[in-house]
């Protein structure tokens, strides 16, 4: 059974800690794992687990440079979520327009 990429992305960004990690990565363009750890009051293992979930969803790229692991945001993957939501936005816009027209009568 093929993996559903959209589901992986939605699961990854469902957690507020992972959203914050992605947010700080997008703002800074890249951070070492140590720089990310320092932003949270969790254990290194907990933060590492969050980063790996983001990585598995394709939202973070981890690159080893010497002894440091750098994390780079891959926010373009969020486009899949945008496209999915956009379909429903179009649907609901039409429904609200119809309701508006009905109520104006």
Image (spheres, rainbow, N blue to C red):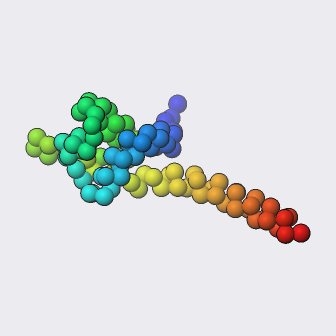
Question: Residue at position x 52%, y 55% from top?
Answer: 82
User: In the image, residue 84 lies at what x, y percent?
Assistant: 57, 52
Which residue in the rendered view is the most extreme toward the right?
105
Question: Residue at position x 18%, y 42% from top?
Answer: 34
Residue 74 visible somewhere in the drawing: no
Q: Quadrant of the C terminus?
A: bottom right
Give the left or right position of residue 89, taking residue 12 as reference.
right
The number of discs equals 0
User: In the image, residue 42 lies at what x, y percent?
Assistant: 28, 34
Q: Nearer the viewer, residue 64 or 35?
A: 35
User: In the image, residue 101 lies at what x, y percent?
Assistant: 82, 67
Hey, which quadrant is residue 26 in on the image? bottom left
In the depicted structure, whether residue 26 falls above or below residue 4: below
Question: Residue at position x 31%, y 39% from top?
Answer: 51
Give the left or right position of residue 52, taking residue 81 as reference.
left
Hey, which quadrant is residue 36 in on the image? top left
Q: Nearer the viewer, residue 39 or 50?
A: 39
Which residue in the rendered view is the most extreme toward the front?
41
Residue 29 visible somewhere in the drawing: yes
């Amino acid at each position: 059974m093929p993996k559903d990429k959209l589901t992986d992305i939605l699961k990854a960004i469902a957690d507020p800690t992972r959203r914050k990690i992605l947010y700080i990565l997008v703002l800074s363009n890249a951070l070492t794992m140590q720089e990310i750890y320092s932003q949270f009051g969790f254990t290194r293992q907990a933060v590492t687990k969050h980063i790996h979930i983001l990585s598995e969803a394709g939202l973070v790229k981890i690159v080893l440079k010497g002894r440091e692991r750098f994390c780079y945001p891959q926010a373009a993957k969020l486009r899949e979520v945008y496209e999915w939501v956009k379909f429903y936005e179009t649907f609901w816009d039409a429904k609200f327009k119809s309701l508006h027209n009905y109520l104006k009568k």
